[in-house]
Image (cartoon, coloured by chain):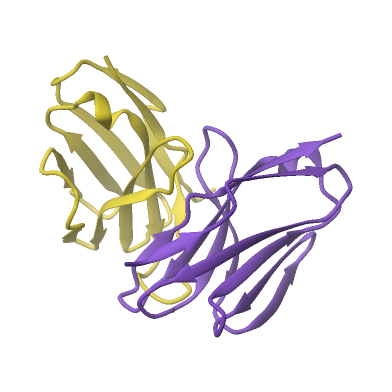
């Protein structure tokens, strides 16, 4: 079966750095997405990785290792508004998007 | 602004009473998706349209149907809602279906079944 694993919940302090990990086992790989979802709202696109390495976009960076089936999302200079769930999703060989259940990030002052 | 719009944002229905959720998009994207998402769970793809071609997920119950009368609109019909169908229903679009195509989501419709 296909599987995406993320921690259920993480807590971090305002101004700090947090890394949210995602591991995946899918039938094929055609890219990995990170989405942010605030409570009661729709997911919004953060990043896309298809090649190994780090993609940086402002305070957010996403890393991919295809050989390890592993990605992480790095959030720097955390702000209270970053409190949300972060969903990892992988596009498989059939171009289906397989979603993780998300990591709920709690930011404390 | 180009966007994905869902109406209503909140829908209350009675057990067994048919309900229709609507989605429209001004992005002129080819692909439209319907997801069901329950609290703290991953979005579950129900079906998607590539243009007028309908693609049903194998495990989507027959109770769920969809219509896409034109490029801009897509509807989700729940013929006989059960208590287990209470969830957030998300509509999404993408320009194409593969590779690095990003899916853009509407704000969702939260369905409550009494």
Q: Position of residue B113 (x, y in %)?
A: 27, 20
What shade does chain B have? yellow
Q: Position of residue A105 (x, y in %)?
A: 68, 44
Q: Is residue B10 above or below residue A41?
A: above
Image position of A106 (left or right of B31): right
In-front residue for pair A46/B58: B58
In-front residue for pair A62/B41: B41
Quadrant of the drawing holding the N terminus of chain A: bottom left
In-front residue for pair B93/A14: A14
Q: Quadrant of residue B13?
A: top left
Q: Position of residue A36 (x, y in %)?
A: 60, 50
Residue occupying the point 39% across, 51% down: B92
Residue occupying the point 82% across, 57% down: A76
Q: Is residue B72 above or below residue A19?
A: above
Residue occupying the point 20% across, 50% down: B68
Image position of B16 (left or right of B8): left
Which chain, by letter, is purple? Answer: A
Q: How many marks?
A: 0
Q: Position of residue B23 (x, y in %)?
A: 33, 41
Q: Quadrant of residue A87?
A: bottom right
Quadrant of the drawing holding the C terminus of chain A: top right
């Amino acid at each position: 079966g296909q599987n995406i694993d993320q921690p259920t919940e993480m807590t971090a302090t305002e101004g700090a750095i947090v890394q949210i990990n995602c591991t995946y086992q899918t039938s094929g790989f055609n890219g990995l997405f990170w989405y942010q979802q605030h409570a009661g709202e729709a997911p919004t696109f953060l990043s896309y990785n298809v090649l190994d390495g780090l993609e940086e976009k402002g305070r957010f960076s996403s890393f991919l290792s295809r050989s390890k089936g592993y990605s992480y999302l790095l959030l720097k200079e955390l702000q209270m508004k970053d409190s949300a769930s972060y969903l990892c999703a992988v596009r498989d060989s059939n171009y289906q998007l397989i979603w993780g259940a998300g990591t709920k990030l709690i930011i404390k002052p | 602004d180009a966007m994905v719009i869902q109406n209503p944002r909140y829908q209350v229905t009675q057990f067994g009473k048919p309900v229709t959720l609507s989605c429209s998009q001004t992005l002129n994207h080819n692909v439209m998706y319907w997801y069901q998402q329950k609290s703290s769970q991953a979005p579950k793809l129900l079906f998607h349209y590539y243009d007028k071609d309908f693609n049903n997920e194998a495990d989507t119950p027959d109770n769920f149907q969809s219509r896409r009368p034109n490029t801009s609109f897509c509807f989700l019909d729940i013929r006989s809602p059960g208590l287990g169908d209470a969830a957030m229903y998300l509509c999404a679009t993408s320009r194409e279906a593969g590779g690095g195509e990003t899916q853009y989501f509407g704000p969702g419709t939260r369905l409550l079944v009494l």
